[in-house]
Amino acid sequence: MSETSQPSLEVPRNARSLNLELPIGSNEGAYDVALLNPNGAELFRTSATAKLEDHIVVLRADVNLAGISPGSYFLGLRQPGLEWMRFPIRVL
């Protein structure tokens, strides 16, 4: 699993969607989106489609984090069949 050294994304528990600008070089198409605990276990998973918008690959995912405790997690992104890319995320 690859991990980035980016600062944590902060997302309120009542968020209903995530609009993510994917790293340069990311592909358009179907992605799995998951909230992972520090051990890598999935707490929430959904699917979304990334599209090119103004030269940036943007992924819009519907989420429901109401049952997630506030704290630090990882946001996992992957295209089907590939390894998770993990990004630090804080649920507020």
Image (cartoon, rainbow, N blue to C red):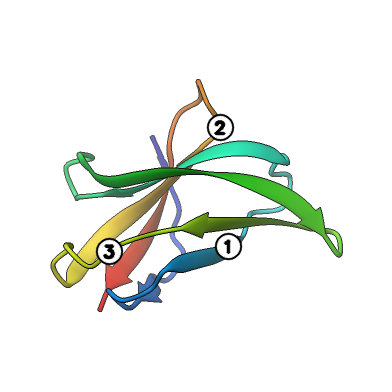
- Amino acid at the residue labelled 3: Leu
Q: Position of residue 8 (x, y in %)?
A: 38, 70
Q: Which residue is mark 1?
A: 20
Horizontal and vertical percent position of residue 22 = 63, 55
Disc 3 designates what residue?
A: 65
| Above-or-below relation of 14 to 83 | below
What's the amino acid at mark 1? Answer: Leu
- Measured as percent of width and height from the top left, residue 28 is found at 73, 41
User: Is 17 in front, or is 58?
Assistant: 17
Spatial separation of the CA atoms under disc 1 and disc 3: 16 Å
What label does residue 79 carry, if any?
Answer: 2
Q: Residue at x 17, y 72 (%)?
A: 70
Q: Nearer the viewer, mark 3 or mark 2?
A: 3
- Left/right of residue 61 with respect to residue 26 in the rendered view: left
Q: Earlier in the sequence, mark 1 or mark 2?
A: 1
Identified at 50% across, 65% down, the residue is 18
Can you give x and y, in whole percent of width and height, for residue 85 in the image? 46, 42
